Amino acid sequence: MKQVTAILLGAGARGQIYANYAMEHPEELKIVAVAEPKTSRRIQFCEKYGILPKNQYESWEPLLAQHRLADAALVCTLDDLHTAPTLAALDKGYHVLLEKPMSNTEDECRAIEAAARNTGRVLSVCHVLRYTPFYQKLKELITAGAVGELAAIDQIENVGYWHQAHSFVRGNWRNSAETSPMILQKSCHDLDIILWLMGRDCERIASFGSLRHFTPENAPKGAPARCLDGCPHSESCPYYAPKLYLTDNIGWPTDMISTDLSYDGRVTALKEGPYGRCVYYCDNNVVDRQMVGMEFEGGAVASFTMTAFTTDSARQIKIMGSKGQITADMGTNTIVLHRFGEDEPETFRIIPPKASNNYGHGGGDYCLMRDFVRLVQGQGQGDGLSSARASLQSHLMCFAAERSRLSHTVTEMSEFLSHP
C-alpha cells in the first residue's frame, strides 16, 4: 500500500497524538506540512517531523490557499475553528480527519456532512471510542444477542477533579462562548457511543446539569487570584496548581502549559498563564455535572452522567437486556457478562494494541489513525466507522441535550432529524 501524505492543522495535544502515527509507521504516513499559531510549538513539531521551512505556516489559511500538498488533512484546530478549514480542505480535494466535535454549531455540522458527501472524500470524525477494543467487544456482545433484547444502557464519564480543573476550568474548553458546551466538547464521545451501541435512532432527550462548584462564591477565604500569589490553602486545596504541574511528570497535562518544561519554565507559566489561576476565579462557564436521559426507537432507554467530582478518570457502563447484563470498566479494561439463570459470569480482559502505549483512549486513538490511513489508501472506498454521516446524529443529540438543559424541557429528536 502506498504511503499516505498529510498536512496537520493545529499541533496541539490532539494533533500531536494523531501525527504520532507517522513516527510509528513512517511507511504508511508522512506529515509534510503544518499550520500552528504558537511559534515554539510549531518549531518543535517541525524539527521532530523534518518539515521543510516552506511548508511551515502560522495559520491554516495560507496553507490551504496553496495547491494540494498531500493526500489528507488532519484538522485539529480549536472547536470554533473546525468548519472553515474542513470545508476548504474538502474543496481542495483532501481527505479529512476531523477532531471532535465536528463544529460547535448545528448548521456547521450539517454543512460539513454535506460537503463530505458531495465531494466524495473520506471524512473521519475522531469518535475514538468506537475504535477501542473495549467498546468493539461490547458491540460484538450486543450484536450476538448476549443480553437478549437490549433494554437500557447506563454510562458514566468520570472526568476526574484534576482533569476538570485543567481542561474545563483553567484550560481551552472552559467557556462555551469561546468553544463548545461541555456535553458537545467532552461528552459527544459518550452520546455517540451510546447511539452506536443501541444501533437505532434516538427519539427524545432530557438533560439536567449546571456549574455549581467552580465559582467565586466557593473560593476559600483569602484565596488569591493565582495559586502562587501566597495562597493560604495550598496544603489543603486539591486544585492547587503546583500539585499538578510542578511534579516529576512533564507529560500530559503538564506539557500543555508551556513548551519550556524546565522547572523554572513551568513556574513562569503558572505565574503568567491561565493554568496558574485559582479554579474559583476563572472565566469558566461550562457545567461541572450533567445528566442526560434518552429514549430510543423501540423503547430502549439510556442514561449518561458526566461528573467532575471523581478521583479516577475512566468510563464505566452497564448494559441491560432481556437475557442478561454487562458491567464494564474502561479503566481496568474489564467486561463482565452475566447471563440470567447462570451462576457464574463470563469475564473478558481487554488488551489494547501494543502501540496504544503512545496514544490514549484505550487504543482508540491508534486504531482510528490506522483505519483512516487504510481508508485513504483505498481512496475512500467504503464508509468509515466514524464518517460525517455516521457522526452527525450523535452531534445533534448533544445540541438537543443542551437545549433541554437550558430550557428545562424534553427535546424531541424529530425536530433535529427531520431537518432538510
Image: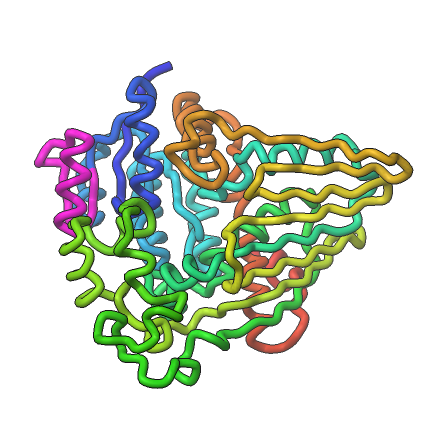
Q: Percent x, y for residue 71?
A: 30, 29
Question: Where are the magenta residues, as a range?
Answer: 34-58
Q: Is residue 161 magenta?
A: no
Q: Is residue 242 above or below residue 286?
A: above
Q: Percent x, y for residue 177?
A: 37, 70
The quadrant where residue 66 appears: top left
Total numbered badges shown on the rendered structure: 0
For the N terminus, the quadrant is: top left
Q: Percent x, y for residue 167?
A: 37, 59
Is 49 on the left-hand or right-hand side of 101?
Answer: left
Residue that appears at 53% across and 43% down: 389
Residue placed most toward the observer, 99 or 376: 99
Residue that appears at 65% across and 61% down: 413
For the C terminus, the quadrant is: bottom right
Q: Is residue 38 magenta?
A: yes
Residue placed most toward the observer, 326 or 121: 326
